[in-house]
């Protein structure tokens, strides 16, 4: 290492070539990096889809779901199994454990399903697949004064044309139901022609076909035998013969049925700004670039609109906008931060030195870009977040090295010797400080849940940047400094530099030195002062003055209003209620347009009204003007205005206003149990408790009442006549649900052909009662004569979680500043146990954000101690002293007090993003401590007394410690003052670092020397008691070799270390709201 450093200093061309190599390689990597919104994460979700046409949720549960769930027991690598049973279908979701190969789990799940010997007759084969991770890219609506079928044709045209564009592979269409052909038999005509429903159905099956009959092999050629008489549209099926009478007359299909091409009964429809629309959504796979895709789609939309006159395409939502804004935020803040770093370094060092130190930022990022390209990391909101986090830290090692070289040069050491000695003297401390920060950020890779999945990329970006920063600081920077004009004899300081030099000396000698002397003389008082400060901060958090939450409420550019009416509500009624919400949003838009923007802008861009997937549910999705333009008119303000304008909708069973988050609802509790009566009662009690909390709103549960059902029971008379219930319900099913007789491929659409009674023959209970049921002997009786009919409420959906029935309650917070962590703790420790005390068969599972929080907490309980232990070991090896290492790490809980106070001043909750800032803060804190103790040990070796060495070390390290803090704050300063929407994600992190650094700097310069003084006194007392005579205080310092180490003294400090580790872990977890007691 020494030889390499000397080589790069004496031959600066080598450093220049290495720098150019980094920059060129980085430019290559950057230009080839793909862009995605979120990092590429391997999917661990396996889905089992089952379809059983005509089956009720209970039939799906009993005949399919329970069998599959039972067979999945014992499959290794499964974290949880959840399911939902609905009309006609069931879905089972299997989550694979982190660390297991999802493909292996998929094979095991598929084998488990294949082992089931039988499923109900009429069920389609189950489909088992692993969900593909698709990122949203862009969506647009096609609308115009044309019918829905024409809109669909334009949508299909756009779909095929987009898929033909290179780099686009995933396009989906929404806003229209499936197409089908309905053959609606008329009961009176069937009776007139003496036809049964089954005979007519079989006639359709047997006459609309295309089959190959084999091959006729002649002597000269082969001829294919084919029957081709297949219709694909309703008109082509009209003349299918269904019966031949005794006199030879052919009864055609149109004589007994109405045949039409129609939309299925599923109400999947969309309206954009009151116009019927087809929505085209383009997604990006892990291999595709979101910025490239959105640019191509925008070009396509422009071309589409230029060519079409009947319809128009309008962008609804563009996923690249947020990414572009984040890139611009990084570029702008990075440039401002770079300039501020230069300014601060120039003020207190030399502008030439400042330039070479600041150059580590682009060099470090260049190296990171190259490796990120090789590792297939994308440019996304999280990786950009990592770059913003680390930009202020990258110059820290350079400041220490350059300042040490410059200080030696100021003392008269020749510049080459100053460069060599100044670099080599601090390289161990610099290496250790960077390594400890790398260890801190590497911990993200070992966190469970979506946090670990998503934020691993942030850790990788930070680690790579710090690594190349270290390489630049050790090998490139010293050569640049040594040959800089700043280290030339004729170099003189200008007036501004002399002014700031006097300012630095004044702060050090007049302001700081007296405080330092007090700390060294009265270390116990200093420790008590900072301990009180920490206790005050913890008290503020526990008392609710500083809020805590897992994922902060950050207004977005869209609002979603979800509506569920009573089951069975007709589509038009549901749409009318949704229109009321839409009209309220339009009125709010008009009000804010005039009152807030004076007519210049409208805060709402688009309003999408959707009915579906059932007739009684739908949503109103509101796309807002971008947050930068809206400024203080947040989505929360607009949401509250719309809520007030809409008012109460008594007939709605579910009405929620919200913005989605990647971690689910802030309040989400699942109650589990197989005693359905107790489960329902517990849900009612818990919902009342949640609704009584003023901090919550939109409390809902997924146990909605189902459709009214007509239960059919066979009469004794019918049983005596040899009829069974299966025969009866089969005939009723034929007429009312219908029978699927064929599936036709029309272009890209699979069209189902259904036979059933016409809607006019099945819209009244009397018609059902008069429906004629045929006996095996040919006799027919009205249904009401052979069965009893009873109307009851059914079930919409049946949910399971790990084999038990589940009912989930969810809620949003009423205000953005509500502490979600405190609410969840109240639920966990008080409300839920009190409710469940009355229902011993019911248990609770906390879901949504709380589940992710607890998964992160469980893994953090292992990761954080290991991380701190590795950092402790690294520093201890550098110092060769447990006591000095303990002094550095004992500052961590004190530094966290600055984080808490900063969030209190800024009125922000401590959240996940705050935790990221805490990790950066720990790295900086250890860095500063290493620099000071390294200098202290050097002074001890030179013969200085302990107090004198501490005093001189603190004074000499005052400038580099202050500069590292100033430059880090300068790098984050623009972010702290940023008012943009995108900055709201990052401000908690900046608050943690900036406010924490204010206290950390003071701690390093005052408390750390005091702790070192206390440790020396404790050791001095212990050795005196053991040996019976008082040694020289300097002789027991680790910098002085040759003195024996007492095992009992080592054990004493080891016990203190373990205790402090526990305190650091508990305090850190408490501050970020992760540890729930």
Image (cartoon, rainbow, N blue to C red):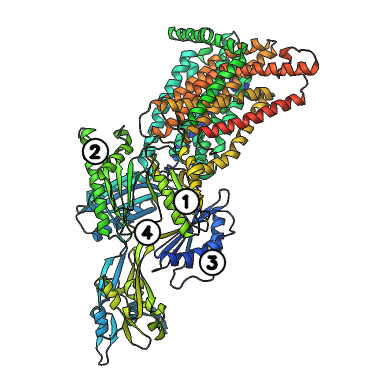
SS type, badge 2: loop
* Percent coordinates x, y for residue 618 in the rendering: 31, 54
Q: Considering only vertical position in the picture, is 87 above or below 296?
A: below
Front of the two marks 4 and 2: 4
Which dot marks residue 602? 2
Q: Position of residue 722 (x, y in %)?
A: 41, 85
Query: Position of 826 compared to 934: left or right?
Result: left
On residue 114, which mark appears?
A: 3
User: Could you say which is closer to the camera, residue 168 or residue 707?
Assistant: 707
- Crowd around label 4: few <14 · some 14–19 · many ≥20 (10 Å): some
Q: Residue at x 50, y 56 (%)?
A: 673
Q: Quadrant of residue 535?
A: top right
Q: Secondary structure at mark 3?
A: helix
Which disc is residue 705 wearing? 4
Mark 4 and mark 1 lie on one chain; the one further toward the N terminus is 1
Residue 327 locus on image (x, y percent): 40, 35
Spatial CA distance of label 4 from label 3 is: 34 Å
Instruction: Single out the residue that lies furthest toward the bottom.
Output: 247
Give the alpha-carbon distance from disc 4 to disc 2, as whole Å.
40 Å
Examine the rendered structure and indicate whether residue 886 appears above or below residue 1075.
Answer: above
Give the image location of residue 52, x and y in percent. Answer: 42, 68
Q: CA distance from mark 1 to mark 2?
A: 40 Å
Mark sitting earlier along the chain (1/2): 2
Q: Which residue is mark 1?
A: 670
């Amino acid at each position: 290492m020494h030889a390499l450093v000397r080589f790069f200093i004496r031959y600066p061309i080598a450093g220049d070539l290495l720098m150019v190599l980094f920059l060129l390689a980085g430019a290559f990597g950057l230009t080839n990096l793909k862009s995605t919104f979120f990092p590429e994460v391997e999917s661990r979700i396996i889905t089992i889809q089952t379809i059983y046409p005509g089956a009720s949720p209970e039939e799906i549960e009993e005949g399919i779901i329970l069998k599959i769930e039972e067979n999945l027991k014992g499959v290794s690598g499964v974290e949880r199994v959840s399911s939902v049973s609905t009309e006609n279908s069931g879905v089972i979701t299997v989550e694979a454990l982190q660390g297991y190969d999802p493909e292996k789990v998929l094979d095991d799940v598929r084998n488990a399903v294949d082992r089931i010997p039988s499923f109900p007759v009429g069920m389609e084969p189950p489909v088992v697949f692993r969900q593909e991770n698709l990122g949203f890219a862009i969506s647009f609506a096609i609308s115009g004064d044309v019918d829905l079928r024409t809109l669909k044709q334009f949508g299909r045209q756009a779909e095929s044309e987009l898929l033909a564009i290179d780099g686009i592979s995933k396009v989906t269409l929404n806003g229209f139901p499936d197409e089908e052909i309905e053959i609606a038999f008329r009961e009176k005509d069937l009776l007139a022609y003496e036809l049964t429903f089954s005979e007519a159905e079989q006639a359709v099956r047997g006459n609309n076909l295309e089959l190959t009959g084999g091959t006729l092999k002649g002597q000269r050629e082969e001829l294919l035998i084919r029957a081709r008489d297949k219709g694909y549209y309703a008109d082509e099926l009209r003349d299918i013969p269904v019966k031949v009478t005794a006199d030879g007359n052919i009864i055609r299909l149109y004589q007994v049925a109405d045949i039409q091409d129609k939309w299925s009964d599923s109400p999947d429809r969309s309206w954009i700004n009151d116009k019927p629309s087809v929505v085209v959504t383009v997604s990006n796979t892990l291999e595709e670039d979101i910025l490239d895709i959105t640019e191509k789609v925008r070009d396509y939309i422009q071309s589409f609109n230029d060519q079409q006159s009947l319809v128009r395409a309008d962008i609804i939502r563009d996923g690249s906008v947020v990414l572009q804004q984040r890139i611009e935020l990084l570029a702008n803040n990075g440039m401002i931060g770079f300039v501020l770093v230069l300014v601060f370094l120039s003020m207190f060092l030399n502008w030439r030195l400042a330039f070479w130190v600041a150059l580590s930022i682009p060099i470090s990022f260049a190296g990171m870009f190259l490796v990120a390209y090789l590792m297939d990391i994308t440019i996304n909101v999280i990786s950009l977040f990592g770059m913003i986090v680390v930009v202020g830290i990258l110059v820290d090692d350079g400041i220490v090295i350059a300042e040490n070289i410059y200080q030696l040069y100021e003392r008269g050491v020749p510049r080459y010797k100053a460069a060599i000695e100044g670099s080599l003297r601090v390289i161990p401390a610099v290496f250790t400080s960077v390594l400890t920060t790398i260890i801190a950020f590497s911990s993200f890779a070992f966190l469970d849940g979506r946090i670990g999945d998503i934020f691993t990329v942030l850790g990788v970006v930070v680690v790579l940047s710090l690594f190349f920063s270290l390489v630049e600081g050790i090998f490139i920077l010293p050569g640049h400094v040594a040959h800089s004009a700043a280290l030339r004899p004729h170099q003189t300081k200008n007036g501004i530099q002399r002014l700031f030099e006097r300012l630095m000396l004044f702060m050090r000698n007049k302001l700081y030195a007296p405080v330092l002397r007090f700390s060294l003389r009265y270390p116990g008082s200093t420790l008590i002062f900072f301990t009180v400060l920490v206790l005050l901060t913890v008290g503020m958090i526990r008392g609710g003055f500083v809020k805590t939450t897992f994922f902060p409420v950050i207004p977005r550019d869209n609002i979603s209003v979800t509506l569920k009416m009573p089951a069975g509500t007709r589509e038009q009624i549901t749409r009318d209620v949704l229109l009321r919400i839409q009209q309220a949003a339009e009125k709010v838009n008009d009000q804010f347009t005039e009152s807030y923007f004076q007519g210049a802008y409208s805060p709402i861009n688009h309003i999408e009204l959707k009915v579906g997937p059932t007739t009684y549910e739908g949503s109103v999705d509101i796309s807002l003007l971008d947050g930068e333009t809206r400024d203080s008119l947040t989505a929360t303000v607009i949401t509250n205005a719309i809520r007030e304008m809409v008012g109460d909708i008594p007939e709605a069973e579910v009405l929620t206003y919200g913005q989605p988050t990647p971690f689910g609802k802030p309040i989400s509790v699942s109650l589990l149990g197989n005693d359905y009566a107790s489960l329902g009662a517990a849900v009612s009690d818990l919902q009342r408790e949640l609704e009584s909390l003023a901090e919550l709103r939109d409390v809902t549960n997924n146990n909605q009442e189902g459709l009214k059902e007509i239960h059919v029971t066979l009469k004794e008379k019918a049983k005596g006549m040899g009829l069974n219930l299966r025969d009866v319900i089969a005939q009723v099913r034929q007429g009312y649900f219908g029978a699927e007789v064929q599936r036709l491929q029309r272009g890209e659409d699979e069209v189902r052909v259904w036979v059933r009674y016409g809607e006019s023959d099945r819209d009244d209970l009397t018609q059902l009662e008069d429906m004629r049921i045929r006996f095996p002997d040919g006799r027919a009786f009205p249904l009401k004569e052979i069965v009893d009919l009873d109307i009851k409420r059914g079930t919409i959906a049946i949910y399971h979680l790990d084999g038990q029935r589940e009912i989930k309650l969810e809620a949003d917070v009423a205000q953005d500043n509500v502490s979600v962590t405190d609410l969840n703790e109240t639920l966990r420790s008080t409300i839920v146990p009190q409710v469940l005390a009355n229902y011993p068969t019911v248990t609770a599972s906390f879901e949504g954000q709380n589940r992710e929080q607890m998964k992160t907490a469980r893994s953090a309980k292992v990761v954080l101690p290991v991380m701190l232990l590795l950092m402790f070991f690294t520093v201890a090896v550098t110092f060769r002293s447990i006591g000095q290492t303990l002094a550095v790490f004992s500052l961590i809980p004190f530094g966290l007090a600055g984080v808490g106070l900063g969030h209190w001043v800024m009125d922000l909750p401590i959240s996940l993003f705050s935790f990221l800032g805490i990790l950066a803060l720990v790295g900086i804190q250890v860095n500063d401590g290493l620099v000071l103790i390294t200098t202290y040990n050097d002074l001890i070796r030179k013969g200085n007394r302990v107090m004198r060495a501490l005093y001189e070390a603190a004074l000499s390290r005052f400038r580099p410690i202050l500069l590292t803090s100033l430059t880090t704050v300068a790098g984050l300063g623009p972010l702290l003052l940023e008012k943009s929407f995108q900055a709201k994600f990052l401000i908690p992190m900046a608050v943690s670092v900036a406010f924490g650094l204010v206290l950390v700097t003071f701690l390093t310069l005052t408390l750390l020397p005091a702790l070192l003084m206390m440790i020396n006194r404790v050791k001095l007392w212990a050795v005196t008691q053991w040996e019976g005579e008082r040694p020289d205080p300097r002789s027991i310092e680790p910098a002085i070799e040759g003195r024996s180490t007492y095992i009992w003294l080592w054990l004493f400090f080891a016990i203190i270390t373990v205790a402090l580790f526990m305190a650091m872990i508990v305090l850190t977890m408490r501050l970020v709201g992760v540890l729930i007691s």
